[in-house]
Amino acid sequence: MVGRKSLKGDYCPSARSLDVIGDWWSLLIVRDAFDGLTRFGEFQKSLGIAKNILSERLRTLVSRGILELVPAEDGGSRMQYRLTEMGRDLFPVMVALRQFGERHLFEPDERHSQLVERETGLPVRLDVRTQDGRSIGAEDTVILKVPE
């Protein structure tokens, strides 16, 4: 098996982000953490993932600063996983993935989970905007690459 190439020193912020996030299991763990899951057993039950793979992904997410291990709120000796500030900054990424799936991967009348605002029950929508607040699309942008 070919080892994974590190993108840690890449000039592209997307590449560096993918180096930290890793893979789809990691994103599903982050999704579940946003949904309030904190314990190993909760993640394992939700994902149906093998325990050894889950252990490795959780360990990696902790070492990369996405999750932190904290004492369980019930005061017992168990530990739980919690999103760090860095992990919580993945919220727009998770919303964007969700919106992509809703738009392209479901039939018009097909049921699916929804992300709604807790207080109002209104669906959450992500827009990309310029620094001055104007809505823009991919056709309105260009990446300024680092000269080599």
Image (cartoon, rainbow, N blue to C red):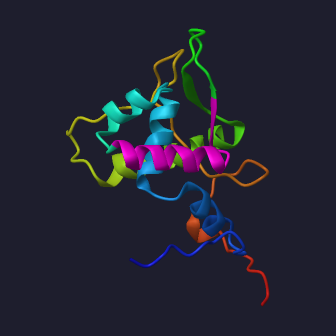
Residue 57 located within the stretch drawn in magenta: yes
Residue 144 visible in image: yes
- For the image, the number of numbered tags is 0
| Residue toward you, 43 or 114 | 43
Rendered position, 82 above or below 71: below
Q: Main secondary structure of the magenta part?
A: helix
**Relative horizontal placement of residue 45, taking residue 62 as reference (left or right):** left
Residue displayed at 79% across by 87% down: 147
- Residue 83: percent from left, percent from top: 61, 34
Q: Residue furthest front?
A: 77
| Residue toward you, 118 or 53 | 53
| Residue toward you, 78 or 28 | 78
Rendered position, 20 above or below 77: below
- Residue 16: percent from left, percent from top: 65, 65
**Relative horizontal placement of residue 29, taking residue 48 as reference (left or right):** right
In this picture, which residue range is highlighted in magenta?
51-69
Point out the image quarter for the N terminus: bottom left
Residue displayed at 78% across by 90% down: 148
- Residue 84: percent from left, percent from top: 67, 36
**Relative horizontal placement of residue 30, taking residue 28 as reference (left or right):** right
Residue displayed at 72% across by 55% down: 130
